[in-house]
Amino acid sequence: MKQWLQKMLIVSVALLTFGVISPGHDIWLHLQDKDEPKQANGPSSETDYRISFSDSQDSGQRETSEKELVTSAKEISYTKFGSKIGPVIADEFDDVIFPKIELAIQETLKTTGDLHKRRLAISERPAGNYSEKIFHVYDMNDRKDLIRFHVRTEKRPQDGYFFNFHYHTSEDEFIAHHSIGDIYWSKNTPPKWLS
């Protein structure tokens, strides 16, 4: 009798809730057919800015490539900031923070050695939500990062929220924080990145 009552209860609950709870249909959109090729997990050629330094005597070619790298870095930074944070901190970022980022990139490129043999790229996808990553400069041959630029949201008691810009280098295995500077937001919580 006890088993019979238990089975009837399960069947009645199943019939009463039939059609009320349905799975999200977004899961079906991301499935691939068996005939479609799967994409690799590594950085793809469409999502990276590639900078190659040639072995030519013309230093103008090298400067142009360095300028392209710096221009890409600025574009990616503003992508990270999004439409809510970007307009608020744009002036201070352009005047104070970005010249230091540019200097850090140039000094890192000088210290890497054999610059004319390296093929450098800059990652295009900054991290969203509250993650720190802005962009990484890496060697395409080795697939190893040379320098990583991050921004961290800090809440200081009685002062409010600040954006702390810093970078890590491969020389110390990305352990040390090399500070670039801080930008004050306000006492209110800042929006998420990429918003």
Image: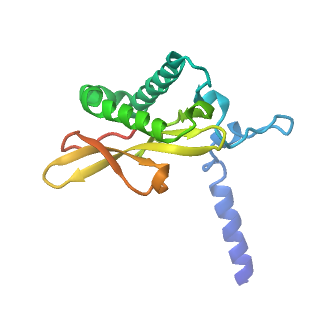
Position of 44 with respect to 60 (left or right) is: right
Identify the residue at horizontal 44%, vertical 27% (top origin): 70
Position of 156 with respect to 3 (left or right) is: left
| Image spot of residue 169 (x, y percent) | 45, 48
Q: In this view of the protein, can residue 63 be seen by the observer?
A: yes
Residue farthest to the right?
35
Position of 177 with respect to 144 (left or right) is: left
The quadrant of the picture occupied by the N terminus is bottom right
Image colouring: rainbow
Q: Eyeballing the image, is 189 above or below 65?
A: below
| Image spot of residue 165 (x, y percent) | 33, 42
Front residue of 123 and 178: 178
Residue farthest to the left?
158
| Image spot of residue 71 (x, y percent) | 44, 23
Q: In this view of the protein, can residue 194 be seen by the observer?
A: no
Front residue of 146 and 153: 146
| Image spot of residue 12 (x, y percent) | 67, 63
Position of 53 with respect to 29 (left or right) is: left
Identify the residue at horizontal 46%, vertical 44% (top origin): 148
Q: Quadrant of residue 13?
A: bottom right
The quadrant of the picture occupied by the C terminus is top left
Front residue of 124 and 175: 175
Identify the residue at horizontal 19%, vertical 40% (top origin): 186
